[in-house]
Amino acid sequence: MEHNQFRIIITGRYKKQIDKAIAAERIGQHSDITPTQALKLINSRESQILHESMEHAKAYEIKRLLQDSGVEIKLEPAKTYFAKEKEQTPETKHRQSFIKKLVNLFKNKPVSEKPIYINWEEKPRYNQTTVIHKKTNSSFLSGLVKLIVLGLVGWYFWNNPPSFGNKGEAFNDNGEAIVVVFTTKNCGTPCHQVLSDLKSRGVPFDHHQIDPEQSDDEWVKIWRSMGRKIPLILAGSEKLGNSSKLQMGAMLGKVFGSRYLTPVEKPLYQKHFRADGTPTIAIYGAQWCKSCTNLKQKLKQAGIEFNYIDMEQVGNKQVVAQALEIQGYPAVWYGYKRMRKIDFNSVASFVGY
């Protein structure tokens, strides 16, 4: 895969309803330009480079934040790093490492001997010129056990390769994030749900129905390098390996902003961000929920900002609970990221307190 660097450019074009003060403040937050200089730049409607070179994920995040404030941003490829032809993927390296271990077991190494020197004062019956050697090579049985263990471990990881985090790679030739979907012929309901969800959101996407047995197919190779999940959705630098509508919306929001969020999701996720577009803590709870009350009190005492949504006061409670997959309280988010550990220490450490 390619790892790109992009040049971030203000085009000089702005939305009609732009709040220049907010836009200038946001430009100042994400560049070396001061808000005062940014305001002059907006009024002049001139084009200017904000960053000469920036990693693609960060570049798209800045582009999203600035365009949400009404500033048109253009990204141009600055540097492109191509993998060498013979560069090994993590999966290939893993297999070669396993094979190398097997080969080492059968190498004809000379038998090594470790000298054991005798304390002659305690053992006078030995001749003082005698040195006893102890062989240190493994027995055949020990080597066989190692071979069996390594074989079983190798077989497991060969068929269940580790997943390499939540990173995908889906960009077009212009460096813009796109959506790529992998399904199989026999995937069934989960794949149908993903395709239906993307279509209902109006998301353009590339669909590849692969045959995992066709190991020489380039799309199969890409799918394998991403963890072998079905369905698998790549969006920019993010990936999703299930059919969860909640996680789909969060991934699309992280990559594309609010563009592909549903009418229900948009107002909900707005409560997960400050006015300047930076994420904040959002807590969904109820008055009778003691854990909610304790968490709110501790966050207030620590001076940690958060938004609280009382689900008992929400008019469309069932719709909200279904959209965010809320099954109990408190349910806590930080921007588009849902927190699984919801005690105070976990929440505070998650936001860097």
Image (cartoon, rainbow, N blue to C red):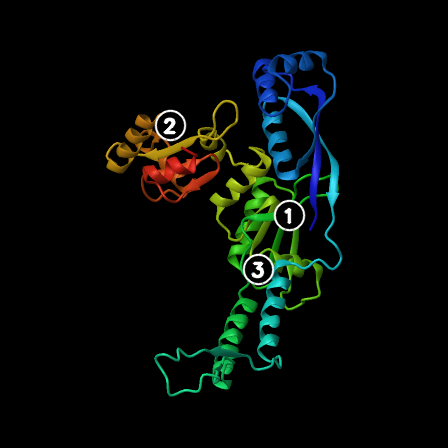
Where is residue 95? Give x, y as percent. Answer: 61, 67
Check the image and report above or below for 347 versus 242.
above
- Label 3 near label 1: C-beta < 8 Å? no
Q: Is residue 222 left or right of residue 342?
A: right
Q: Dot 3 corresponds to which residue?
A: 228
Amino acid at the residue labelled 1? Glu
Residue 274, image x and y in percent? Answer: 47, 25
Distance of label 3 from label 2 (alpha carbons): 39 Å
Numbered disc total: 3
Question: Measured along the vertical axis of the image, is residue 97 above or below residue 230?
Answer: below
- Which picture quadrant has residue 307? top left
Circle on res. 169: 1
Q: CA distance from mark 1 to mark 3?
A: 14 Å
Residue, disc 2: 304
**Residue occupying image coordinates x 60% and y 57%:** 183
Q: Is 159 located above or below residue 287 in the figure?
A: below
Residue 286 appears anywhere in the view: no
Using the rendered image of the protein, determine whether residue 326 is visible from the camera's viewpoint.
Answer: yes
The kind of residue on which mark 2 rests is: Ile
Residue 324: x and y in percent read 42, 40
Depth order, front residue of 171/5: 5
